[in-house]
């Protein structure tokens, strides 16, 4: 790595910088971006795709607008679920749907994030609004895994990825990593 926290390996012969992502044994809880604002599950699932080392990748630059549309859609979905009769919530949902439709790749990104989060049982709109600090270690691990896997990294470093997971989640993760390695040529290192 170019530096201890860069997440970037030196360039390949083709000039591409492989993206290395790391999921720690005990994912962080609480203040994810240093702003003092407590992170929600939605923040944790999406923020790493647009900040930090991964933000400089061509994939992140292409998906930034789509990601903002997805976050808007998720927030509108949660607001609509909380109070479906509220006119402001309905307008927010209409605006979010329009933004999703107008932003290239947003529906695909929403589907990918939702599918991964659903496979790890962290996908419901109400769950996405929960603060990270309120989650158990297993729930935080599932959110961290879903976020990492959604980024389609070249190399995944997973520190004890099965800690806090039940057998169903462990089986799913093993199958997913095997498939990802075959289809996308992602290398996984489990520590």
Image: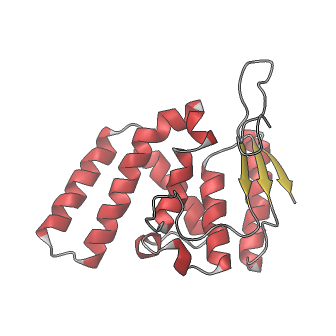
Q: Position of 174 compared to 51: left or right?
A: right
Q: Position of 189 compared to 104: left or right?
A: right
| Quarter residue 84 falls in | bottom left
| Quarter residue 5 falls in | top right
Q: Residue at x 71, y 42 (%)?
A: 7
Q: Residue at x 60, y 51 (%)?
A: 150
Which quadrant is home to the N terminus? top right
Which quadrant is home to the C terminus? bottom right
Above or below residue 17? Residue 147 is: below
Q: Residue at x 67, y 78 (%)?
A: 137
**Camera-nearest residue between 190 and 38:** 38
Give how far across and how far down residue 184 sits, in percent.
Answer: 72, 40
Above or below residue 130? Residue 10 is: above
Q: Residue at x 15, y 76 (%)?
A: 85
Give how far across and how far down residue 40 sits, in percent.
Answer: 47, 68
Above or below residue 105? Residue 171 is: below
Q: How many marks?
A: 0
Colour scheme in use: secondary structure
Residue lying at the far top of the rendered structure: 14
Give how far across and how far down residue 113 sits, in percent.
Answer: 53, 56
Above or below residue 122? Residue 136 is: below
């Amino acid at each position: 790595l170019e530096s201890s926290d860069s997440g970037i390996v030196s360039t390949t012969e083709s000039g591409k910088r492989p993206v290395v992502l790391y999921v720690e044994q005990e994912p962080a809880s609480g203040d994810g971006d240093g702003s003092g604002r407590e992170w929600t599950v939605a923040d944790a699932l999406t923020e790493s795709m647009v900040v930090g080392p991964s933000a400089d990748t061509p994939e992140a630059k292409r998906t930034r607008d789509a990601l903002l549309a997805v976050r808007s859609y998720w927030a509108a979905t949660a607001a609509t679920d909380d109070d479906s009769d509220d006119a402001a919530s309905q307008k927010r949902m209409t605006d979010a749907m329009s933004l999703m439709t107008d932003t290239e790749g947003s529906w695909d990104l929403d589907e990918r994030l939702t599918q991964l989060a659903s496979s790890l049982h962290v996908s419901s709109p109400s769950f996405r609004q929960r603060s990270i600090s309120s989650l158990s270690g297993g729930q935080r691990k599932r959110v961290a895994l879903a976020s990492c896997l959604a980024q389609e990294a070249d190399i995944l470093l997973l520190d004890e990825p099965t800690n806090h997971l039940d057998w169903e989640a462990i089986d799913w993760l093993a199958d997913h990593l095997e498939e990802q390695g075959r289809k996308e040529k992602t290398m996984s290192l489990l520590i």
